[in-house]
């Protein structure tokens, strides 16, 4: 099984505009909210029940990763992700909790 490294912004490069733009989509907010329930755990991307096709899912994962909201790793046939809670809380204290609470 091979592990592929994907490009992720460094914590100090996280931009509030990119984060808010990524969170503007309700499907992506839902993914972030689900990840926030267990922020230290990784989830298989395929485990999220989103009402969109595979190509749209792929785009959602890329937007979340490029905005710095999630860390992803490619393992064999699976793509795993987890919330970058510590980085986000350090850079934008309370933002993720506020967005989730607002629904």
Image: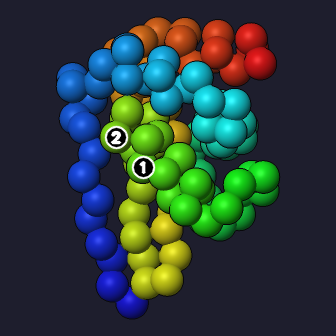
The C terminus is located in which quarter?
top right
Closest to the observer: 21 or 98? 21
Whether residue 42 is visible: no
Residue 73 found in image quarter: bottom left
Helix, strand or loop under label 1:
helix
Left or right: 60 with respect to 90?
A: right
Left or right: 58 with respect to 2?
A: right
With respect to residue 20, does 68 lie above or below?
below
**Image coordinates for residue 14, horizontal then vertical, percent:** 29, 24
The N terminus is located in which quarter?
bottom left
Whether residue 100 is visible: yes
Question: For mark 1, does the 10 Å Cα neighbourhood hold few (<14), some (14 to 19), or many (20 or more) residues?
Answer: some
Q: At x 47% / y 9%, what residue is drawn?
A: 93
Q: At x 33% / y 76%, what residue is drawn?
A: 3
Closest to the observer: 32 or 52? 52
Residue 88 found in image quarter: top left
**Image coordinates for residue 57, horizontal then vertical, percent:** 59, 56
Q: At x 28% / y 45%, what residue is drawn?
A: 8
**Image coordinates for residue 37, horizontal then vertical, percent:** 72, 37
Q: At x 33% / y 85%, what residue is drawn?
A: 2
Q: Do the CB atoms of the residues marked 1 and 2 lie less than 8 Å apart?
A: yes
Q: Which mark is residue 62?
A: 1
Q: CA distance from mark 1 to mark 2?
A: 6 Å
Residue ID for mark 2:
66
With respect to residue 80, does 3 lie above or below?
below
Question: For mark 2, does the 10 Å Cα neighbourhood hold few (<14), some (14 to 19), or many (20 or more) residues?
Answer: some
Helix, strand or loop under label 2:
helix
């Amino acid at each position: 099984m091979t592990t592929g490294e994907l490009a992720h912004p460094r914590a100090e490069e996280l931009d509030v505009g990119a984060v808010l733009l990524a969170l503007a989509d309700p499907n992506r907010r839902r993914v972030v909210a689900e990840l926030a329930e267990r922020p230290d755990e990784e989830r298989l991307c395929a485990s999220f029940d989103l009402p969109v096709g595979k190509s749209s899912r792929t785009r959602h994962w890329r937007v979340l990763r490029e905005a710095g909201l999630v860390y992803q790793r490619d393992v064999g046939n699976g793509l795993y992700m987890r919330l970058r809670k510590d980085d986000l809380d350090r850079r934008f204290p309370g933002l993720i909790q506020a967005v989730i609470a607002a629904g």
